[in-house]
Image: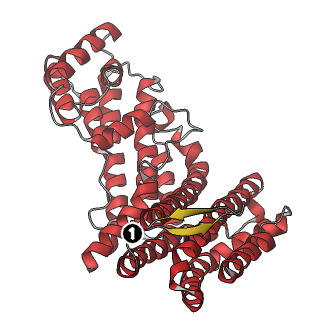
Amino acid sequence: MVVVVVVATRVGMVLDDCYCQSYFGLLLLVYLVISQQVDLVVHEVLVDVVTLAKEVSVEVIPSIIYLTIQEFHELAGKYRDAFTAYKTDYFSERGKFQEFTSNIIAVANNLHTCIESTEKYKQQIRLSMEGEQNSVAPMATPLSSGRRTAVSQQQLIENMDALNTKWSNAASVAVNYLREEVQTDIAPSLVELFSKKWLTGSAALETICMTVSDYYHDHKHLRPVARTALLMDLQFRIVSEYLKAIETKRLTFTTYEERATAGKRMKSDVSRLDNLYAEFASSDDMADQLPLLTSIVASAGDVISLKDKSLLSLEATSFARKFPNCPAELLAAVLATRDDVGRSDARSLADEVLQHVQFHPKDQIFDQLFALRQQESSEWLPNIGMANVFKSDFISRLKRDV
């Protein structure tokens, strides 16, 4: 049991020394994260613990691994607390933290490395334990109370899976902080989209695209899975702003000329966004990773700018076929922006055409978009499935390499 004490002390020293109550202690812990020491600690401790355990007895290896992973559970939580405190201080006075973006990018990347290290080591444990012991014959594990309980191979695997979930959740939080930073900068321009100012020539969309592009000079250093999640989050936010503006009647029309101008402007905006995301997707590691959501803005523009009202039912049906999971109130709002359609008629037509397509295949990514449009500007959907995306991305690559 000397090995257990040595390993627990080593990990405990990292926690006690770094996670102090002072602000400088938190900064030091963040420094450890961004200087890649988190993933080094994971790798070195997991390797050293087995090496040391073998010098005592092969039989104690499961017990020591179990205790070591328990220590890492606590470490993962405290690292998350540390960079969360760093983020809070940054947003309270952004001018004092010039390296926030690059630091949080390093945090996200290093946490992804922790996922990889843990997953690889889990596979090693699975293989080695199958060769050295029968998984149904559990080993004794000492507890703090002095009692002894049993740890099986399955328990070890489940404990490491739980650890990876913590790493993944923390990585998701880090990416959300990067998104929040961009969102803060583009918020004033977002509220101008589909407004009177936008209709008369506002540069809001161009400002948004330039801001996102500027941040991408840093964001491109994120691992592909994190970069994809961040860029998709931003696309959700931008596209949903058009839908939110339509539903809240940020802009209504009194003439066909206004509607025609709006339809042309919507298509121009879509073209600009599509070109921007095509640039992001041009790198080899991003191929086919950035599905576009902008088509709904262009289609809404077609409904709004249609000149011949007698064809409106046909145009609305075309919209519904493209987006069969579109909420009726959203399609009704698109129709009601027209100067020649009343609110009651708009809702009746929306209900009618959506009824005809209720069994059509639905793209779930638009379900996420439609949910986001109902949130306040200060809110944000979490990275949907992000905690699992990090892990599944690594596992899929691991399988390809085998």
Q: Is residue 123 visible from the viewing direction of this image?
A: yes
Q: Quadrant of the N terminus?
A: bottom right
Q: Is residue 228 visible from the viewing direction of this image?
A: no
Q: Nearer the viewer, residue 81 or 3?
A: 3
Quick check: 387 left or right of 92? left
Q: Residues within 10 Å of mark 1 (few under 14, many from 20)?
A: some
For residue 57, above or below residue 98: below
- Where residue 323 appears, x then y in whole percent? 23, 34
Quick check: 209 left or right of 89? left
Q: Nearer the viewer, residue 310 or 390?
A: 390
To which quarter of the image does residue 284 belong?
A: bottom left
For residue 148, above or below residue 129: above
Q: Residue furthest right?
A: 22
What residue is pinned by disc 1? Answer: 135
- Kindly identify the residue that appears in the image at 28 percent across and 67 percent down: 287
Q: Nearer the viewer, residue 226 or 158?
A: 158
- Where residue 244 appears, x then y in whole percent? 45, 31
To which quarter of the image does residue 395 belong?
A: bottom left
Q: Secondary structure at mark 1?
A: loop
Residue type highlighted by circle 1: Ser
Q: Quadrant of the C terminus?
A: bottom left
- Where residue 129 appears, x then y in whole percent? 41, 77
Quick check: 95 left or right of 49? right
Q: Residue furthest top?
A: 344
